[in-house]
Amino acid sequence: MLLLAIASPAQTTTPQQAMAFEQQGQFKEAEQAWRSIAEQNPRNAEVFAHLGLVLAREGNYPDAVPAYRKALALDPKLPGLQLDLGLALFKQQNFKEAIAPLKAAALATPADVKPKILLGMSYYGAAQFAEAVPYLEPAVAASPDNLQLRMVLAQSCLWSAKYDCTLEQYRQIMQINPNSAQADMLAGQALDGLYKTDEAIAQFQAAAKASPNEPNVHFGLGYLLWKQRKFDEAQREFKLELANDPNHAQALAYLGDTLVKQGNEAEAQTMLERAVKQPGAARQAYLDLGILYADRKQNAEALTYLQRAVTMDPKEVDAHWRLARLYQAMGKQQEAKVEFAKAREIHQTKDEGLVRQMTGSPVAQQP
């Protein structure tokens, strides 16, 4: 970056001195020098760009960002400035804000892979997974042995329902690390998304064998078995997940549902009540508790849980139907009529894919 000529005869600190501090790694002295120069030259973009740079090198990204923005306002075409701003925002995990400057940097220097990697990672961090994929793919091609980057690409493909892409990255990851339980789990979720449940189960079984304490591995396997109504096997897997994480909200919820289906209502209620106390509790837990209380004519409690289940996912027919039946039992015929009508309007019974159930999956957090 070439420093523009600065005319300030009374100035005691020169740009050459500030640059010397910067080049010698004396960033605190460089910061003070550039601040002094900026006071005398408030219209010089390069001064603010250098100030932002030394602040960033000090790790002071919150103050670096406004310095970069000031420089951009003065000279939007200053080379490297968009990348520096994007990186400072990225370092603060302000992923959505980082996207615009990083996209500008990627367009300005198409041969440079760094802004593309940062842009892909920013889209990923902002949960814009489909947008992340086109930037992560060339980054992975440029660094084919970067396992972490491949895993991020595989996750982005999975969470944007690009299942073939997920499986291709799985194959590549397994060549680098044949014992990757995380890769097996990603492949299992992708296969489940392709309605290849038996193959998905095999992947999760491989993952559980390779790493029995891997978070979510037993829940994922249990959920796939639950979908196939193999409740004894599912129960065992949910309990194994809870042995690893006693407060696993999804495992508690689906273990409770499994116990309901097996007729063990007392133990089921215990699990379901534990489930709804956890952050990110599954809708299934509220639905099942509502059903249990309704069956016992504890209508006030049933109403609370069923209404919550409807609120959590208004497109699910089961909760509307159960709520309508409850309203009928309570003599609230108009409310029942409304819920029955909503149930009839919903023409699909969703087969919830595993990717939407896995704890920690951004997709699972989306409404």
Image (spheres, rainbow, N blue to C red):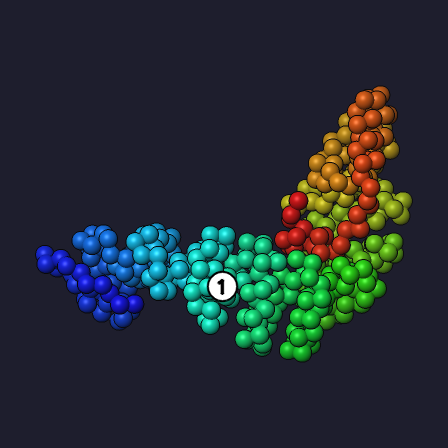
Residue at screen point 35% across, 65% down: 79
Is residue 38 toward the left or the right of residue 70 in the image?
Answer: left
Residue 360 screen position, x and y as percent: 64, 54
- In what quadrant of the picture does the N terminus appear? bottom left
Residue type pointed to by label 1: Leu
How many marks the image carries: the answer is 1
Taking depth in this image into account, of 166 and 311 the one nearest to the observer is 166
Residue at screen point 76% across, 59% down: 193
> Circle 1 is placed at which residue position?
118
Helix or strand or loop: what does disc 1 sit on? Answer: helix
Residue at screen point 43% across, 63% down: 105
Count residues near mark 1 (Cα–Cα under 10 Å), then give few for <14, some for 14-19, many for 20+. Answer: many
Above or below for 308 versus 365: above
Outermost residue on the left side: it is 10
Above or below for 286 versus 123: above
Q: Is residue 227 visible?
A: yes
Taking depth in this image into account, of 352 and 264 the one nearest to the observer is 352
Is residue 88 toward the left or the right of residue 16 in the image?
Answer: right
- In what quadrant of the picture does the C terminus appear? top right
The picture quadrant where one finds residue 347 is: top right
